[in-house]
Image (spheres, rainbow, N blue to C red):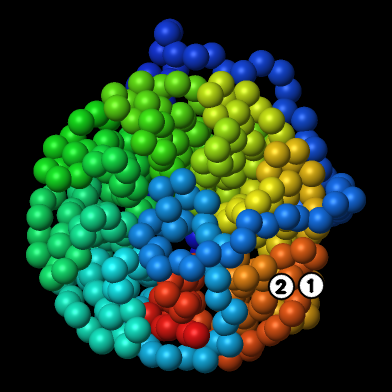
Amino acid sequence: MKSLIILTLLLPLLVACSWFEKNANPPLEGERTAVLPQADQLKSESASTPTLDAAQDVANWPAQNQNIFQTGAHANITPKFEKIWDRSIGEGKSDRKEITTRPVAADGKIFAMDNRGNLTAMDAKSGKLLWRVRSRAESNSALAGGLTVDNGVLYVTNGLSQILAVSAANGGKIWSANLDAPARTAPTVADGKVFVVTRGGQSFCLDAQSGKILWQHKGLLESAAILSGAAPAADGEMVMIPYASGEVLAMAAGNGSVLWGESLASGRAENNLATLHDLRAPPMILDDIIIAANYASNITAMERRSGDRVWAHNFGALQPMTTSGDTVFLITTNSQLVAINRKSGELFWSVPLQSEEREAGEPQEYWYGPLLLNGQLFVLSANGMGELRDAMTGAVTAAHDDLAEPAENPITANGMIYWTTASGEVVAYQ
């Protein structure tokens, strides 16, 4: 199992948090009721099949999960998995460091960051190196963060207690701002504002042009967190802030006031590793429904305006989720690929992901994805085993066992699929 957890020695204190202040909204009453059994025993509860929106041409992948709503995309591409190019981005995975940054794509460019904070821009079609800059001192050993691009600017969290804005055209620095602690996930940019969450249990809203901090919020400090966490989701009016404690807060984008909150800390863990409340999958804004899943044991759908629970399950999400039509697709922490009715919470289907037979006690294969591509779900194992699965049933339609070993989740743009590799490259497949 790929190592995901970073433990830090922190005092068991609660940081002052407006969510717990006297005037904050109290937690919703009532017990959480599991709709389904644990993930390794999931069975379909729906007699119907998923419905999908039509596949669209996806030219850009500018945010952690494609867009500011963090919903993923249904891309109009049927891949053959022919490698078109590969390009080194710097240092790859090592015993002490991981590549934790998902690449982003915009305006015919691919942007990536290695595990030392080196930024690389490449031509999306040819892989030609366009520019490369350091986002921090070369000798610094901090873990990396995340990327997002908006309106010709690349916004970077590089694992230090800062956020930077650089030119997407040439990598030139535009501004930088200091944060309370490192941010190890991508920022989210919406309507001229940059939203970012730190490992110090705080969230920040900054002006996208100047880097000026417009507001900030203190959440609950957590001593154990996922190595690379979840980016906020936004729709202009509201921003969904995910904290490592499992708290997901709906906040007014303009002034940071808390509208409502939900805790994903309850629920049963799928395995010993999954006793974390942190989120790796960003929360998703789906019209009138918000869906959030922590790493350990909980996925919950909430009404957008009130925060009232619509449905909940006792399993978590290993990777960012994707949605189309009435369906949410995700990989659970114990490597089940599942399809859920996003409105009712009913399970359409669930299938196990395992590239080969494993002996008792051997860890499960680690999987990335899913990407939704012309009605098929692409999932990719850590050892380079790629599968296409029918989005209606989960059945395997094609398999490729010789793909580049990934370090982070793949993206798609302009009819291509890209991902960073464990050896420190970006690869492009068609």
- Quadrant holding the N terminus: bottom right
Number of numbered callouts drawn: 2
State how far apart marks 2 and 1 are (Cα): 5 Å
Identify the residue shown where x is 18% and y is 76%.
132
- Where's residue 386, x and y in %? 62, 80
Tag 1 secondary structure: loop
Identify the residue shown where x is 69% and y is 30%.
310
Give the residue type at disc 1.
Ala
Given residues 321 and 242, the one toward you in this image is 321
**Which residue corresponds to mark 1?**
395
Give the residue type at disc 2.
Arg
Q: Do the residues labelled 2 and 1 touch (CB within 8 Å)?
A: yes
**With 289 as the anchor, is 84 left or right in this view?**
left
**Which residue corresponds to mark 2?**
389
Near mark 2 (Cα within 10 A), the count class, few <14, some 14-19 or many ≥20, is: many
Q: Quadrant of residue 27?
A: top right
- Where's residue 24, x and y in %? 44, 13
